[in-house]
Image (spheres, rainbow, N blue to C red):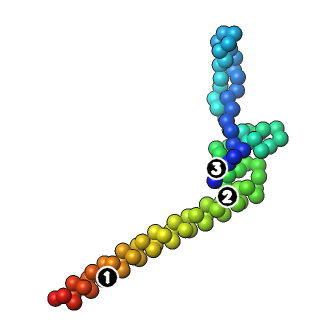
Amino acid sequence: MVCKCYDTRKPLKGWNDATTPILGEAYGVCLGTKEVERCTCNGDESLCDFYPNVMKVARERREEEQKQKDIEELKQMFQHLADLINKQNNEVQSM
């Protein structure tokens, strides 16, 4: 899940002239913390640095989505195998 509290910031390193700022490397921050602290989740709730419950729910959701994808893939594989078996049975019967 994409974290709604994730944002990036670039620190001010100085000025080229009176109106052009020099910005540093971007880093992630969590807008959900009081101090808008740095975080390393990169916007992925399952990697949340601050809220274990958010991380747990996101990981459970991701696991459930993966299970559903796996089930669909298995269904397609079984259907393909059933089609092959039916095709072979039809060829044998037509001989």
10 Å crowding of disc 2: few (<14), some (14-19), many (20+): many
Secondary structure state at the residue bearing disc 2: helix
Q: Amino acid at mark 2?
A: Ala
Q: In this image, 89 relative to 25: left or right?
A: left
Q: Is residue 90 visible?
A: yes
Residue at (64, 44) in percent of width and height: 42
The residue labelled by disc 1 is 85
Q: CA distance from mark 1 to mark 3?
A: 43 Å
Mark number for residue 20? none
Element class at badge 3: loop
Q: Earlier in the sequence, mark 2 or mark 1?
A: 2
Question: Furthest-top residue in view?
Answer: 17
60 shown above or below 11: below
Q: Amino acid at mark 1?
A: Ile
Image: 84 above or below 48? below
For the C terminus, the image quarter is bottom left
Secondary structure of the residue carrying numbered label 1: helix
Residue 73's spot in the image, x, y percent? 46, 69
Residue at 71% in and 60% down: 56
Residue 74 vertical position relative to residue 90 in the rendered view, above or below: above
Q: Residue 92's x, y, as percent?
A: 21, 87
Q: Amino acid at mark 3?
A: Val
Is residue 44 visible in the rendered image? The answer is no
Residue under the point 69% across and 17% down? 14
Image coords of residue 30 (percent x, y) = 74, 42
Dot 3 alpha-carbon crowd within 10 angstroms: few under 14, some 14 to 19, many 20 or more: few
| 57 up-or-down from 86: above or below | above
Measure the alpha-carbon separation of dots 3 and 2. Answer: 9 Å
Counting from the top left corner in percent of width and height, residue 87 is at 27, 80
Q: Which mark is residue 58?
A: 2
Sequence-wise first label, 1 or 3: 3
Question: Mark 3 = which residue?
Answer: 2
